[in-house]
Amino acid sequence: MVGVRGMVEGDVVAVSAIRVAGWRAAYAGLVPQSYLDAMDVAEDSARRRALLAAGAGRVRNLVAVEAAGDGAEHVVGWAAFGPCRGEPEDSATGELYALYVRPDRIGTGAGRALTAAVIGQAAEHGRRDLVLWVLADNSRARRFYARAGFSPDGSEATDTYDGVPLREVRYARGLREL
């Protein structure tokens, strides 16, 4: 059973490990291997701690958790969302900045649970629409987001990773009042 709750400082190392493993699994063959190999959980943890502290109130971080047999919970996924970058803070459009699930937990419902929680909370915070960016060649992620009600809105951008330009497409979906 997968639950979703707000991320706390004690989740940072697990979230960073999920992010690094997620990048390496999802972007193998898409992003230069040199970039993926250079990713470091300790460096990401330091950055994530700073972002968590700085983003209080603006950026929402959620984690997907599974209960262990001993009653403990294990973080198996992470999502971050907030105001759409480049728009006013009170814009009706929100943005899903990141969504990663531990590679061995893909297909267990953790990603769907996180997505549903993000959609619900974004609507509760007054967002009418939600956008996200995905690598154009990441067909698995594009299928996942399409099943969650997102579709390409025609916007494109290019990011460069270790000197290699990669095309991204923006997906969007409307949010229903809850």
Image (cartoon, helix red, strand yellow):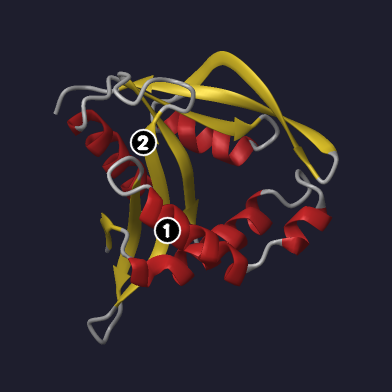
Q: What is the crowding at mark 2: few (fewer than 14 residues within 10 Å), some, or many (at least 20)?
A: many
Q: Position of residue 59 (x, y in %)?
A: 36, 43
Tell me what residue is drawn at x 22 percent, y 22 percent.
176
Residue sitting farthest toward the left: 178
Asked if one can make out residue 15 in the rendered structure from this viewpoint, the answer is: yes
Q: How many marks?
A: 2
Of discs 2 and 1, which sits in the foreground?
2
Tell me what residue is drawn at x 30 percent, y 19 percent.
92
Badge 2 marks a residue whose secondary structure is strand
Q: In the image, is residue 17 above or below residue 5?
A: below
The type of residue carrying mark 2 is: Gly
Q: Position of residue 107 (x, y in %)?
A: 46, 54
Tell me what residue is drawn at x 76 percent, y 46 percent.
31
Q: Earlier in the sequence, mark 2 or mark 1?
A: 1
Residue that badge 2 annotates = 82
Residue sitting farthest toward the right: 163
Q: Position of residue 133 (x, y in %)?
A: 55, 31
Residue 41 has which mark? none
Does residue 165 appear left or right of residue 140 in this picture?
Answer: right
The reply to whether callout 2 and callout 1 are in contact (CB within 8 Å) is no
Q: Residue 91 sits in which quadrant?
A: top left
Badge 1 marks a residue whose secondary structure is strand
In this view, the residue in front, 113 or 163, is 163
Indicate the quadrant containing the C terminus: top left, top right, bottom left or bottom right. Answer: top left
Residue 77 has which mark? 1
The type of residue carrying mark 1 is: Gly
